[in-house]
Amino acid sequence: MRLRKKPVLCNYYVTYRCNARCGFCDIWERPSPYVTLENAHKNMQDLRRLGVKVIDFT
């Protein structure tokens, strides 16, 4: 099997906020800012330059 030298897929987290109240996780207790439009635009340009073909926004 031949490996690609560039990433194909990116899981892009707009925020780490979560509205679930799981007993084993406390991430919902910590504030998490949303990504700014400027940062998102720069990140998309960087991902394109790296050769990413698919972006999964979450």
Image (cartoon, grey):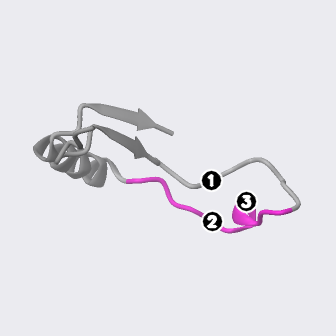
Query: Which residue has dot 1 on it?
Result: 17
Image coords of residue 28 (percent x, y): 73, 59
Q: CA distance from mark 3 to mark 2?
A: 7 Å
Query: Which residue has dot 3 on it?
Result: 28
Q: How many marks?
A: 3
Q: Residues within 10 Å of mark 1 (few under 14, many from 20)?
A: some
Q: Quadrant of residue 16?
A: bottom right
Query: What amino acid does circle 3 point to?
Result: Trp
For the point 31% across and 31% down, which residue is it? 54
Q: Which mark is residue 4?
A: none
Q: CA distance from mark 3 to mark 1?
A: 6 Å
Q: Is residue 17 above or below residue 8?
A: below
Query: What amino acid does circle 1 point to?
Result: Arg
| Relative horizontal placement of residue 41, taking residue 11 as reference (left or right) | left
For the point 62% across and 53% down, which residue is it? 17
Q: Residues within 10 Å of mark 2 (few under 14, many from 20)?
A: few
Query: Which residue is situated farthest in the front direction here?
Result: 1
Q: Which span of residues is magenta-colored?
A: 24-35
Q: Residues within 10 Å of mark 3 (few under 14, many from 20)?
A: some
| Relative horizontal placement of residue 37, taking residue 30 as reference (left or right) | left
- Mark 1 and mark 2 residues within 8 Å of each other at the beta carbon: no
Disc 3 or 1, which lies upstream in sequence? 1
| Relative horizontal placement of residue 58, taking residue 9 as reference (left or right) | right
Image coords of residue 18 (percent x, y): 68, 50
For the point 42% across and 34% down, which residue is it? 56
Q: Nearer the viewer, residue 49 or 5?
A: 5
For mark 3, give the secondary structure: helix
Residue 34 belongs to magenta span? yes
For mark 2, give the secondary structure: loop
- Mark 3 and mark 1 residues within 8 Å of each other at the beta carbon: yes
Image coords of residue 10 (percent x, y): 35, 42
Q: CA distance from mark 1 to mark 2?
A: 7 Å
